[in-house]
Image: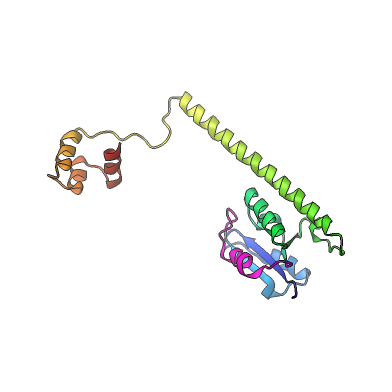
Amino acid sequence: MNNKIFYYARVSSREQNLDRQIEAFKKLGADEREIICDKESGKNLERSGYQALKNTMLRGGDTLIVKSLDRLSRNKTDIKNELQYFKDNNIRLKVIDLPTTMMDLQKGQEWVFDMVNNILIEVLGTIAEQERATIRKRQREGIDAAKAKGRHLGRPKLELPENYDGVMAKWRAKDITARQAMSMLGVSKSSFYRLVTE
Protein backbone atom coordinates (compact mmCIF):
# COMPACT_ATOMS: atom_id res chain seq x y z
CA MET A 1 0.00 0.00 0.00
CA ASN A 2 1.40 3.39 -0.97
CA ASN A 3 1.69 5.94 1.78
CA LYS A 4 0.24 9.29 0.76
CA ILE A 5 1.18 12.90 1.38
CA PHE A 6 -1.51 15.48 2.07
CA TYR A 7 -1.17 19.23 2.53
CA TYR A 8 -3.39 21.38 4.70
CA ALA A 9 -3.83 25.16 4.28
CA ARG A 10 -6.03 27.43 6.37
CA VAL A 11 -6.85 31.12 6.61
CA SER A 12 -9.26 32.62 9.13
CA SER A 13 -11.72 34.33 6.79
CA ARG A 14 -13.05 34.18 3.24
CA GLU A 15 -11.35 37.50 2.41
CA GLN A 16 -7.89 36.14 3.22
CA ASN A 17 -5.70 34.45 0.65
CA LEU A 18 -4.36 30.88 0.65
CA ASP A 19 -1.81 31.54 -2.13
CA ARG A 20 1.27 31.82 0.08
CA GLN A 21 0.64 28.43 1.71
CA ILE A 22 -0.28 26.73 -1.57
CA GLU A 23 2.84 28.15 -3.24
CA ALA A 24 4.99 26.67 -0.47
CA PHE A 25 3.31 23.28 -1.01
CA LYS A 26 3.84 23.38 -4.77
CA LYS A 27 7.56 23.98 -4.23
CA LEU A 28 7.54 20.63 -2.42
CA GLY A 29 5.87 18.98 -5.41
CA ALA A 30 2.26 19.05 -4.19
CA ASP A 31 -0.53 18.16 -6.59
CA GLU A 32 -3.75 20.25 -6.35
CA ARG A 33 -5.73 17.11 -5.38
CA GLU A 34 -3.53 16.58 -2.33
CA ILE A 35 -4.13 20.08 -0.92
CA ILE A 36 -7.04 20.48 1.50
CA CYS A 37 -8.08 24.04 2.37
CA ASP A 38 -10.28 25.76 4.93
CA LYS A 39 -11.29 29.41 5.18
CA GLU A 40 -12.36 29.25 8.81
CA SER A 41 -11.15 30.38 12.21
CA GLY A 42 -8.47 28.38 14.01
CA LYS A 43 -10.21 28.77 17.37
CA ASN A 44 -11.25 25.10 17.26
CA LEU A 45 -10.96 22.03 15.05
CA GLU A 46 -14.53 21.98 13.71
CA ARG A 47 -13.64 22.79 10.11
CA SER A 48 -15.08 20.79 7.22
CA GLY A 49 -11.81 20.41 5.27
CA TYR A 50 -9.73 19.46 8.28
CA GLN A 51 -12.31 16.99 9.61
CA ALA A 52 -12.57 15.30 6.19
CA LEU A 53 -8.79 15.12 6.01
CA LYS A 54 -8.45 13.63 9.48
CA ASN A 55 -11.43 11.26 9.43
CA THR A 56 -11.55 9.98 5.85
CA MET A 57 -8.25 10.64 4.07
CA LEU A 58 -5.27 10.25 6.40
CA ARG A 59 -4.17 6.67 7.17
CA GLY A 60 -1.33 5.22 9.20
CA GLY A 61 1.98 5.77 7.38
CA ASP A 62 0.73 8.92 5.59
CA THR A 63 2.31 12.36 5.91
CA LEU A 64 0.54 15.66 6.53
CA ILE A 65 2.34 18.89 5.64
CA VAL A 66 1.38 22.33 6.96
CA LYS A 67 3.08 25.72 6.57
CA SER A 68 3.08 26.42 10.32
CA LEU A 69 1.63 24.79 13.44
CA ASP A 70 -0.99 27.53 13.91
CA ARG A 71 -2.60 26.44 10.62
CA LEU A 72 -3.82 23.35 12.52
CA SER A 73 -5.23 25.50 15.31
CA ARG A 74 -4.59 28.64 17.32
CA ASN A 75 -5.39 26.74 20.50
CA LYS A 76 -2.22 25.26 22.04
CA THR A 77 -4.15 22.43 23.73
CA ASP A 78 -5.75 21.46 20.41
CA ILE A 79 -2.36 21.46 18.65
CA LYS A 80 -0.87 19.29 21.40
CA ASN A 81 -3.80 16.84 21.15
CA GLU A 82 -3.53 16.71 17.34
CA LEU A 83 0.22 16.01 17.51
CA GLN A 84 -0.50 13.20 19.97
CA TYR A 85 -3.24 11.86 17.65
CA PHE A 86 -0.87 11.85 14.66
CA LYS A 87 1.81 10.14 16.71
CA ASP A 88 -0.61 7.48 18.02
CA ASN A 89 -1.92 6.83 14.50
CA ASN A 90 1.50 6.72 12.81
CA ILE A 91 0.83 9.85 10.73
CA ARG A 92 3.89 11.98 10.17
CA LEU A 93 3.41 15.75 10.48
CA LYS A 94 5.85 18.00 8.65
CA VAL A 95 5.83 21.72 9.39
CA ILE A 96 7.56 23.88 6.76
CA ASP A 97 8.38 26.59 9.33
CA LEU A 98 10.02 23.96 11.60
CA PRO A 99 12.83 22.63 9.38
CA THR A 100 13.71 19.75 11.76
CA THR A 101 10.32 18.19 11.03
CA MET A 102 10.97 18.36 7.27
CA MET A 103 14.01 16.04 7.29
CA ASP A 104 13.71 12.85 5.29
CA LEU A 105 14.91 10.21 7.73
CA GLN A 106 16.80 7.09 6.81
CA LYS A 107 15.55 3.73 8.05
CA GLY A 108 16.39 3.44 11.73
CA GLN A 109 16.40 7.22 12.32
CA GLU A 110 12.70 7.45 13.20
CA TRP A 111 13.74 8.16 16.80
CA VAL A 112 14.86 11.66 15.68
CA PHE A 113 11.33 12.49 14.52
CA ASP A 114 9.85 10.93 17.69
CA MET A 115 12.14 13.07 19.81
CA VAL A 116 11.16 16.28 17.97
CA ASN A 117 7.47 15.34 18.22
CA ASN A 118 7.73 14.60 21.94
CA ILE A 119 9.49 17.92 22.58
CA LEU A 120 6.77 19.80 20.62
CA ILE A 121 3.98 18.02 22.53
CA GLU A 122 5.67 18.74 25.87
CA VAL A 123 6.39 22.39 25.08
CA LEU A 124 2.90 23.08 23.70
CA GLY A 125 1.30 21.35 26.68
CA THR A 126 3.32 23.50 29.08
CA ILE A 127 2.52 26.72 27.17
CA ALA A 128 -1.20 25.87 27.04
CA GLU A 129 -1.25 25.08 30.77
CA GLN A 130 0.54 28.35 31.52
CA GLU A 131 -1.96 30.28 29.37
CA ARG A 132 -4.89 28.64 31.17
CA ALA A 133 -3.34 29.50 34.57
CA THR A 134 -2.80 33.12 33.47
CA ILE A 135 -6.41 33.41 32.25
CA ARG A 136 -7.73 31.95 35.54
CA LYS A 137 -5.52 34.35 37.54
CA ARG A 138 -6.77 37.36 35.52
CA GLN A 139 -10.39 36.26 35.97
CA ARG A 140 -9.86 35.87 39.73
CA GLU A 141 -8.21 39.31 39.96
CA GLY A 142 -11.09 40.83 37.95
CA ILE A 143 -13.71 39.25 40.22
CA ASP A 144 -11.84 40.35 43.37
CA ALA A 145 -11.44 43.92 42.03
CA ALA A 146 -15.16 44.10 41.13
CA LYS A 147 -16.18 42.79 44.57
CA ALA A 148 -13.86 45.30 46.26
CA LYS A 149 -15.70 48.08 44.42
CA GLY A 150 -19.02 46.61 45.56
CA ARG A 151 -20.04 45.61 42.04
CA HIS A 152 -22.40 42.67 41.60
CA LEU A 153 -21.17 40.10 39.07
CA GLY A 154 -23.42 37.95 36.95
CA ARG A 155 -26.95 38.76 35.85
CA PRO A 156 -28.51 41.75 37.58
CA LYS A 157 -31.09 40.82 40.16
CA LEU A 158 -34.64 41.28 38.93
CA GLU A 159 -36.63 43.98 40.68
CA LEU A 160 -40.07 42.72 41.77
CA PRO A 161 -42.91 44.74 40.26
CA GLU A 162 -45.19 46.35 42.87
CA ASN A 163 -48.16 44.20 41.81
CA TYR A 164 -46.06 40.98 41.87
CA ASP A 165 -47.75 39.22 44.83
CA GLY A 166 -51.30 39.85 43.59
CA VAL A 167 -50.60 38.85 39.98
CA MET A 168 -48.67 35.72 41.00
CA ALA A 169 -51.48 34.66 43.35
CA LYS A 170 -53.95 34.91 40.43
CA TRP A 171 -51.58 32.99 38.12
CA ARG A 172 -51.00 30.21 40.68
CA ALA A 173 -54.76 29.95 41.24
CA LYS A 174 -55.04 29.59 37.42
CA ASP A 175 -57.31 32.65 37.25
CA ILE A 176 -55.03 34.16 34.58
CA THR A 177 -52.62 32.67 32.00
CA ALA A 178 -48.86 33.08 32.14
CA ARG A 179 -49.09 35.42 29.14
CA GLN A 180 -51.63 37.62 30.96
CA ALA A 181 -49.43 37.60 34.09
CA MET A 182 -46.40 38.71 32.01
CA SER A 183 -48.47 41.52 30.49
CA MET A 184 -49.77 42.69 33.89
CA LEU A 185 -46.27 42.59 35.41
CA GLY A 186 -44.73 44.24 32.35
CA VAL A 187 -41.95 41.64 32.06
CA SER A 188 -40.64 39.41 29.28
CA LYS A 189 -41.20 35.65 29.15
CA SER A 190 -37.63 34.88 30.32
CA SER A 191 -37.88 37.44 33.16
CA PHE A 192 -41.24 36.02 34.22
CA TYR A 193 -39.87 32.49 34.54
CA ARG A 194 -36.78 33.80 36.32
CA LEU A 195 -39.06 35.49 38.86
CA VAL A 196 -41.00 32.24 39.25
CA THR A 197 -37.90 30.17 39.91
CA GLU A 198 -36.15 32.74 42.11
Please give the name of the residue rendered at 38% of the width and 37% of the height, measured from the top-left corner: 155
Quarter that holds the N terminus = bottom right
- In the picture, measured across the screen, residue 122 lies left or right of residue 167, that is right
Quarter that holds the C terminus = top left
Residue 141 pos. (x, y %): 55, 30
Residue 193 pos. (x, y %): 28, 43
Please give the name of the residue rendered at 86% of the width and 59% of the height, measured from the top-left corner: 109
Image color mode: rainbow
The verdict on residue 118 being magenta is: no
- In the picture, measured across the screen, residue 96 lies left or right of residue 189, that is right
Quarter holding residue 48:
bottom right
Quarter holding residue 72:
bottom right
Total labels drawn: 0
Q: Is residue 120 above or below residue 96?
A: above
Of residues 134 and 15, the one drawn nearer to the viewer in this rendering: 134
Please give the name of the residue rendered at 56% of the width and 59% of the height, measured from the top-left corner: 46
Of residues 50 and 82, the one drawn nearer to the viewer in this rendering: 82
Residue 172 pos. (x, y %): 17, 41
Quarter holding residue 57:
bottom right
Q: Is residue 42 above or below residue 30?
A: above
Please give the name of the residue rendered at 76% of the width and 50% of the height, measured from the top-left corner: 118
The verdict on residue 54 being magenta is: yes
Of residues 190 and 23, the one drawn nearer to the viewer in this rendering: 190
Residue 154 pos. (x, y %): 42, 36
Q: Is residue 196 above or below residue 112?
A: above
Magenta stretch bounds: 41-62
